[in-house]
Image (tube, rainbow, N blue to C red):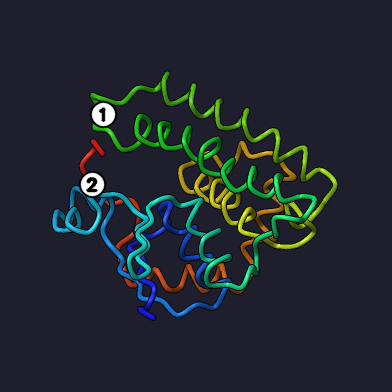
Amino acid sequence: MSKLTLWHCADARSFRALWALEELGLDYELRVLPFPPRAFDKGYFEENPLGTVPLLVDGATRMTESAAIPHYLATVHGGGRLALPVDHPAYGAYLNWLHHGEATLTFPQTIYLRYAKLEPEERRQPVVAEDYKKWFLGRLKLAEASLADGRDFLVGGSFTMADISVGYAIMLAQMIGIGPELPPHALGWFRRLKTRPGYLAAKEAQKAGPPLFQPSSPARE
């Protein structure tokens, strides 16, 4: 069996995949790229025509979706660990949270990030950025309500890949300056998550590469 290979930019969406690999204790090769790789490492297009991270390669399998990769790793390589089985009463909720983290929460953050920080000054759109920040905070209400009972994990009573998916959205919010506006239950939940050995190991592993934001980063992704 070939070793799993993950192409990653520090603290980008690919952190979900890296965190999942560490939580499962899987053997993998990490290739850390500058951000955004499609601007700073043109050769990467030969591996991934999209030029985006993550890219997980597992033999003939190639995956680029940051919410799908953790579930794949759990079910294909983790013996079902950190995923709920299909006969679990909360399986539907698990899948919903898994995709909610990316499609509902991370998407508006990327628009905010682009038009508040990454574009050149003359191309920034503060009104657009503010609207998408409000969109993100509004969509976070579901997680905040679910975590209001003080639970440590989103679904199923244990840590799952759904926690990684949604947890990354909170991590990104803190990185891009939305942290002070995060609601208390979601923030407290993530503070507990980031003490996990798997999270800490992923943070350490990515230090081999450049940081997510570089002053010389081209504005347009």
Asked if 26 appears above or below 107 in the picture, the reply is below
Residue corresponding to mark 1? 121
Q: Quadrant of residue 97?
A: top right
Q: Give the image location of residue 14, x and y in percent.
A: 42, 56
Task: Point out which mark residue 167 bears.
Answer: none
The amino acid sitting under disc 1 is Glu
Q: Which residue is mark 2?
A: 217
Q: Quadrant of the N terminus?
A: bottom left
Residue nearest the viewer, comparing 173 with 37:
37
User: Residue 41's x, y, as percent?
Assistant: 17, 56
Residue 175's spot in the image, x, y percent? Answer: 48, 48
Q: Estimate the spatial distance between the alpha carbons at disc 2 and disc 1, rounded to whole Å.
A: 13 Å
Q: What amino acid type is highlighted by mark number 2?
A: Ser
Please report the residue visible at 62 percent of the width from the left and 31 percent of the height from the top: 139
Q: Residue at x 51, y 38 (%)?
A: 103
Residue ranking furthest to the top: 127
From the top left corner, tell me how far across and down residue 70 is, in percent: 53, 60
Task: State the image quarter where residue 206 is shown.
Answer: bottom left
- Which one is earlier in the sequence, the residue at label 2 or at label 1? 1
Which is nearer the eye, 139 or 217? 139
In the image, is residue 97 above or below residue 42?
A: above
Q: Secondary structure at mark 2?
A: loop
Tell me the residue at 55%/26% (across/down).
135
Badge 2 crowding class, 10 Å Cα cut-off, few under 14, some 14 to 19, many 20 or more, is some
Work out whether 177 lies above or below 203: above
Q: Residues within 10 Å of mark 1 (few under 14, many from 20)?
A: few
Count of marks overlaid on the render? 2
